[in-house]
Amino acid sequence: MIAVKINSDKKWSVLRELMRIDSVNVVKGPVYFLSEEQFRKLQEVGAHYELLTEEEAQTKWRELSQRLSNGPPMRPARRYEIYLPMTYNDGQLIEDEKFIQTEAELLEHFEGVTLMQRRSETALKGLWRYAGEVYSDEITIALIYAYETEETDEWLTSYKEGLKDRFQPLEVLIVAFPVEVI
């Protein structure tokens, strides 16, 4: 893993490109841990970045590991999946800015989000029926883990309405699964 600070004013669109390759691990700072392929893409798009020294990278990785392991063992939580369409109902691609805004909001509220973004040739495909008609979507799924399940349920219920306005689907699917965090 290669540790970098991304200093570009287009940081969120750069991250979106990197997430098309693989998920990105984030440490507050913000420091991003990238694969070699993602690092090559970062250089290719011409983003301004600062490469961390090996010592700085190890310190940040320990911070991330400690933050992830600080909770008590087997703490009950929920995994939330937010299904977002990649295209509008007319087939036009949804603007990157809308995904960037959503990622930023989820990161701000939950301090972590994983976007299961796929390249177009392997995009996640969803089929669903509404009012007797079958619809097909290319989708991405935002994954969130949270301990405060009642508060989170209320927040996501409200947030869902904003997502419906932003992405203009007939419905935004949000599902929750009980998990235990070790």
Image: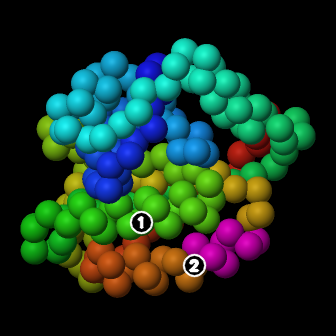
Q: Tag 1, which secondary structure?
A: helix
Give the residue at x 58% y 45%: 29
Kindly identify which residue carries mark 2: 157
**Which is more N-terminal, label 1 or label 2?**
1
With 86 as the anchor, is 171 left or right in this view? Answer: right
Please report the bounds of the magenta region as a residue range.
150-156
Please check the rendered image and state whether residue 152 is part of the magenta-colored stretch, yes or no.
yes
Q: Position of residue 124 (x, y in %)?
A: 28, 46
125 to the left or right of 71? left
Q: Can residue 31 be seen by looking at this rendering?
A: yes
Where residue 103 sits, quadrant-wise, is bottom left
- Is residue 176 something that shows in the picture? no
User: Does residue 168 sit above or below 147 in this rendering?
Assistant: below
Is residue 165 found left or right of 159 in the rendered image? left
Question: At x 48% / y 46%, what residue is drawn?
Answer: 114
Report, in whole angstroms, how far the alpha carbon at label 2 lies from the one at label 1. 15 Å
Q: Quadrant of the C terminus?
A: top right
Foreground of the two, 65 or 145 = 65
Q: Secondary structure at mark 2?
A: helix
Q: Is residue 103 magenta?
A: no
Label drawn at residue 4: none
x, y (%) of residue 100?
35, 61
> Which mark is on residue 102?
1
- Badge 1 amino acid: Thr
